[in-house]
């Protein structure tokens, strides 16, 4: 089963949410459909600038695609 890990990321002076998953996964096409997502070469992950509703958007996007989502790092931050 595919799974995604969402975790806090401070990048380019902004609080962000990193989207981490196994490389080569079909999840890439799902992530590319998310508005305002950016790929960080430095951190080797996709991310969105954190803001109101961003975490909820990510969780609902992946759950609607029946992808397991680990948000434990975001809730601890």
Image (spheres, grey):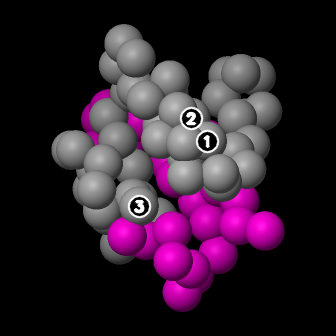
- Label 3–label 1 contact, CB within 8 A: no
Disc 2: CA contacts within 10 A as few (<14), some (14-19) or many (>=20): some
Residue under the point 65% across and 29% down: 74
Mark 3: which secondary structure?
helix
Q: Say which quadrant the C terminus sits in.
A: top right
Q: Which residue is mark 2?
A: 59
Q: Which residues are magenta?
A: 1-29
Q: Tell me where residue 47 appears, x and y as whole percent.
A: 39, 50
Precedes in sequence: disc 3 or disc 1:
3
Q: Which residue is mark 1?
A: 63
Taking 44 as reference, is 65 above or below it? above
Mark 2: which secondary structure?
helix
Precedes in sequence: disc 3 or disc 2:
3
- Label 1–label 2 contact, CB within 8 A: yes
Numbered tag placed on residue 30 in the rendering:
3
Disc 3: CA contacts within 10 A as few (<14), some (14-19) or many (>=20): few
Q: In the figure, residue 14 lies in which quadrant? A: top left
Q: Tell me where residue 10 appears, x and y as whole percent.
A: 44, 39
Residue under the point 61% across and 42% down: 63
């Amino acid at each position: 089963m595919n799974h995604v890990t969402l975790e806090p990321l401070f990048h380019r002076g902004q609080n962000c949410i990193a989207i981490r998953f196994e490389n080569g996964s079909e999840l890439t096409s799902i992530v590319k459909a998310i508005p305002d997502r950016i790929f960080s070469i430095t951190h080797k992950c996709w991310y969105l600038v954190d803001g109101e509703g961003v975490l909820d958007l990510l969780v609902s996007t992946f759950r609607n695609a029946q992808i397991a989502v680990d948000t434990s790092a975001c809730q601890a931050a």
